[in-house]
Image (cartoon, grey):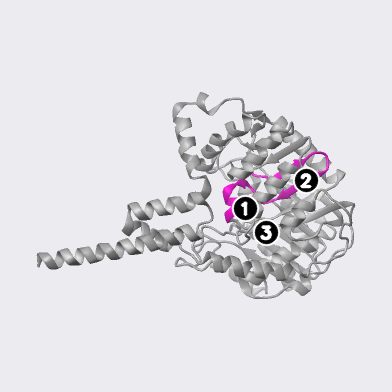
Amino acid sequence: MVEFLTVTNAIIAAVLGVLALVAAYRALLTSRTPQRATAWILLILLLPLVGTLLYLVFGHANYKRFERERRKSDEEMFDTASEAQIVQGPSRLDPFARIARLPVIGGNDMDLLIDGKATYDAVLEAIRGAQSTLFVQFYTIEDDDIGCALRNALIERAEAGVSVWLLHDELPFFGLPRHFKRKLEDAGVRLARPKGPKRLLGPFQFNYRNHRKLVVVDNEIAFTGGLNVSKAYLGRDPSIGPWRDTFARFRGPVVAQLALHFSSDWMWATGEDLRGIASHAPKPAGDANAVALAPSPAEDIAAGNLYFIALAHAARTRLWISTPYFAPDRDVLTALRFAALRGVDVRILVPARADHYITYFAALAYFDDLRSVGGEIWMYDPAFVHQKVALVDEDLVSVGSINLDIRSGLLNFEITVLMEGQRPAQQVADMLETDFSNATRVDMDLADRPILTGMVARVARLFAPVL
């Protein structure tokens, strides 16, 4: 009997060992970052049973197939992009256009919408004026008065005969209640959730989330920026308090590019092809050049990271970035540091308060890397600053959903609009100058902070690839 148990235990141990090695090899092949692969491999090899089970549930997915199929779908969609108003000759947006795989187009205009009230007022007014089509996409929508105002506006337009499509990336059991969605569907609103790679957890997808915020009205007006749909973005969540954010309204041919990005997400989520609607290009509405760049984890070029690297390389005199989270990829951090070494005025505006403590402390561990070469970190004091805005020199701006962290760069679907023009640049410059006047420059090294703060920051930085 003892010999039988010994043999059985040996067989079980061998099987577990083989499974652990296979799981570790799969983690090496499929993980998006070396740090993530290392973390899974260590967990699997140190705790073969627990680590393998955790990997099969939370880590394993057919990423390669997802990336290949999603990339092919996107390329087919972008092939229908209108050639109207394509800018002939060199533009400072050319590197971003190559990252986006879309052309630089002229004839655009932008209006900044500063903070929640201005954003919701403008978006809801545009939705209520829709005559033919509405594309609406948000990462989160809450069942509060702001969410209900959006729902009611969409229902009213759908009942008036407008075709309405709504994408919302929610986790099961943590998203909108069924009655909220049923009212939308009963009115004729087409509702879907973005899809990620197939995995054991199915819809419980913590990576490859769709973080885009986008509203396209009649293919004539489009909005994007940092806000989701919740009273928190009006500063009415007592757990966070005052909130600082930015959206933007766009007119001109760039609206068609934004519509194509929505259509790409919708086709992947539902199989429905909206190219016939989305490819209509609006007439010129201004004199700014623009390109809509939508980084995706399905791409093989790390477009989110390349976006920040391109910003750093484009800067000649000034690079101002506002981001709620600062945990940059190594390549991005190197590009920012080199820009500062070239004499560029590199400033990063981050919150002085935290909404997620691990990301807040991780950011503290990165500050010294930029400050040591002449870059500046500024902490915004009056509110939690959530805007994702960049200003390069006197003529390039970006407004969208991309955070300056590894998750945005590698693991999320994001979107931003880059514009080349004096008017949009002056709007953003005026806004950021006001923001910096309400911020405090960081002049303290991490080593000079309390010992416990330094310890927590350094440990939090280790988790930066998955924050």
Q: Is residue 69 left or right of residue 294?
A: left
Q: Secondary structure at mark 1?
A: loop
| Residue type at numbered disc 2 | Val
In this figure, which residue is indicated by the disc labeled 1?
Answer: 230
Q: Is residue 244 left or right of residue 35?
A: right
Residue 142: x and y in percent read: 59, 57
Magenta residues, start to end = 386-411
Front label number (3 vs 1)? 1
The answer to whether the residue labelled 2 contacts the one labelled 3, judged by CB atoms less than 8 Å apart, is: no
Front label number (2 vs 3)? 2
Give the alpha-carbon distance from disc 3 to disc 1, as whole Å: 10 Å
In the rendered image, which quarter contains the N terminus? bottom left
Residue 13: x and y in percent read: 26, 62
Specify whether residue 399 is painted magenta. yes
Residue 149 shows which numbered tag?
A: 3
Residue at image location 46% in from the left, 63% down from the top: 60
Residue 397 shows which numbered tag?
A: 2
Instruction: Tell which circle, 3 or 1, labels the residue nearer the N-terminal end.
Output: 3
Residue 259: x and y in percent read: 75, 64
Q: Quadrant of residue 69?
A: bottom right
Give the alpha-carbon distance from disc 1 to disc 2, as whole Å: 26 Å
Residue 161: x and y in percent read: 76, 74
Residue at image location 68% in from the left, 64% down from the top: 152
Q: Secondary structure at mark 3?
A: helix
Front label number (1 vs 2)? 2
261 or 182, which is in the foreground? 261
Label 3: how many Cα within 10 Å (few below 14, some 14–19, many 20+): some
Instruction: Tell which circle, 1 or 2, labels the residue nearer the N-terminal end.
Output: 1
Q: Quadrant of residue 86?
A: bottom right
Instruction: Tell which circle, 2 or 3, labels the residue nearer the N-terminal end.
Output: 3
